[in-house]
Image (cartoon, rainbow, N blue to C red):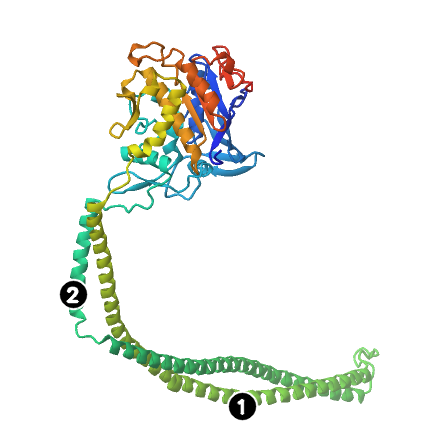
Amino acid sequence: MNKYGFFIRKLQLEGSGKETVSVEFKKGLNVIYGPSDTGKTFIYQAIDYMLGASKIPKDIPESEGYSLCKLQIESFSGDKYLLERALKGGDFRLYDKADKLLDTLKSKNDKKSSNRTISDFLLELCNINDKEIRKNADGIKQRLYFQDILKYFLVDEEVIITDKSPISVKPDRGFNASASFEKNVFKFLLTGQDDSTIVTLLKKDDVVNKTGRVQLYDELIKQLKVDLKDIDYKEIDEQVDKLNERIDNFRDSYLTSSLEFKKYDEEKKVLFKKIALDETRLININEILKRSTILKQQYVSDAERLKATIETGQGLSLITTANCPVCTGEVEETVNVEKLISATTIEIKKTSLLLNELENSRKIYLSEKSELDSLITQDKKHYEEVITKIQDELKNVLDEISNKIKKFTSKKEELSKIKTLKEKLDSYITQRDTIQKIIDDYKVSKKITNYDELTVTLLDPIVTEIKNILVEMEFDNINDKNIGFSEELLDFSIGTKNRKAFGKGYRAILYAVFIISLLEYLRTKSYQIGFVMIDSPLNPYKAGDKDDGVVPNNLGEQFYRYLYKNIKDEQVILIENTAIPDDLKENVNYKVFDKENGFLPKIISDFK
C-alpha cells in the first residue's frame, strides 16, 4: 500500500444555536444513498470547498445558521488532521489530532506569496511538491496546485455524464487552465515527471525586444571602442597604483598634522578659559579693594570722633557744679563722664583692631591682584603664540596637504573614468553576447523542440485497468472487444465506439470506471491522492436503454461489487440514489437519507 495520500474521516458543520451535524467516512467503499433534496450534494460541495475550492456550498434553507465547516482527514502514514474554514469563505486553520493549532493556510494560491496554502499542505501529504506543468507550445510553465488534479478524484453529478474528455474537462472550482495544461497534468499523474526542466521559449515580442537590445549594445560598444582607442590599460593601472600610494602618504601626513592641530586647539581653549576665569577674579578683587578703601575711611573717621568724645569728657570733668544763678536751684549731673570716657576708650580699641584686620586683608588682595596681573599677561602672550602657531603654521600645512590630496585624487578619478569605461565596454559585450545566445538558442529550440506528449503508449496501463474492471463487471461481452484510447478525442473507446458516443447512463459509469482505474494505477507510484468521491455515477443509468447497447440490467450492482471487492486500502465515496445490493449493506459504510432524515438539519449518527 502506498504510504502517501490521505482519506476523509469526518465532515462536520457548526453554527451558533444550531445542533452540530456530521457524517463520517472510512477506508474502502462508502455509500450515501437517498433521493434528491436530502443534503447529499451539499456534502459533496462542502468536501470540495474544504479541499480548496473557492466556490462555497450552495445556500439551501437547511444550512441557514451554520457558519463553520470542519473536515477531518488522515494520511496513509497515520497522521490525523482537522481543517477548519468559515462557510462564507476565507482561509483555513489546520489542527493536529490533539486540537493544537499547527498553521493558518491561505485559501488562494499566490506564487508571489511565501505564505503556506491549503494546496501546499495537501500536495505534501500526497508527496507532490513544487511541480511545474507546461501549458503551451512555447514551454511556458505554471505551478501545479492541488485543485489542478482534484478533478480526477472529485467528480460531480454534472461532469460524470459529460461527453467531453475526462482529461480535458474543466470543472467549475474557481480556476481555468489551457487544454495543453490539462493534458500535461494527466501526463504527470501517469509518469511522475513534471516539466520543471523544460526551457521556456521566448515569445515573439520578447525576441523583437531582445534583438533591439542587441542592436543598442552594438552601438554603445562601437562608440566606446572609438573613445578608448590606443589606450594602454596596463600603464593606467600603474599610474593609479602610484597615485593611490601618494594619496595614502598625504593622508598620513594630514592625519599627523591634524593631531598636532587638535593638540594646539585644545591648548588654546584651555588658555582662553583660564584667562577668562583670572580676569573675572581680578575684577572681583578690584571691587573688594575699592570697598575696603571706603571702609578704612569710615574706621578712621570713627576713631577721630571717639577721640574727640574723650577729650570733651575730660574737659567736663574739670568743671565744678554750682546752683543755678537764676533760680538758685541745684543742677543735677545727668552724664557719668568717667563711664563715658571708659566706654569710648574701649570702642577706640575695637575700631583700631578692625582697621588692622582690614589692612591685613588689603595686603593679601593686593598681593593676589599683582600675581593675577602677571599671570594674565603671561597667559595672553602664550595664547597669542598658540593662535599664531595654528593660523600661520598648522593651518597652512593642512591646507597645502589637502590641496595636494585633491589634486592627486582628481588625477586618479580621470584615470579611473577610463577604467570605468573599459569595464562598461566589457559589461556591454557580455550582456550583448548573453542576449544574443538566448536568441540563438531560441532559434535552435524553435526548430528542434519536441515535448513529451500524452500518447497512447502512456495510457496503456490505464486502458488495461479499465478493461480489467469492465471484464470483472461483465460489461457487454468485453472480452471480445478492444479497449483503445484516442489521442485526438483524449478519451477511450470500447470496440469501435468512443465513450462519448454512448448514452449518458453508460457515459457516467464508464467515466467512473476511468476514475477508479486511475486510483488503482497510482498504487504503484511514489505519490498518491488516496480517495475518490463521485456524485451519482449510477443514477443516470437506465437498464435496457437502447442507445447503450446490450449490457446486463444489474450493471450498477456489479459496479458496487467490484468496488467492495477491490477497494480496501484506498477510499471511494459514492453519492447515489441507486440501491446497493442487500448483502453488501452490512459490509460497507452505508448511510440512507430520506426526506425526513437528511444530512441537514439533523445530526447524522455514525456509520454502522
Q: Residue 349: image x %, image y %?
A: 75, 87
10 Å neighbourhood of mark 2: few (<14), some, or many (≥20)?
Answer: few
> Are the residues flagged by discs 1 and 2 in contact, CB closer than 8 Å?
no
Rendered image quadrant of residue 277? bottom right
Q: Which of marks 1 and 2 is nearer the N terminus?
A: 2
Left or right: residue 282 compared with residue 386: right
Rendered image quadrant of residue 552? top left
Q: Residue 66: image x %, image y %?
A: 49, 22
What residue sits 24% from the left and 57% below the top?
A: 434
Identify the residue under disc 1. 374
SS category of the residue bearing label 1: helix
Residue toward you, 533 or 3: 3
The image quadrant where one finds the C terminus is top right
Amino acid of disc 1:
Ser
Kindly give the residue lying farthest to the right in the view shown: 330
What residue sits 35% from the left and 13% below the top?
A: 551
Mark pair 1, 2: CA separation: 77 Å
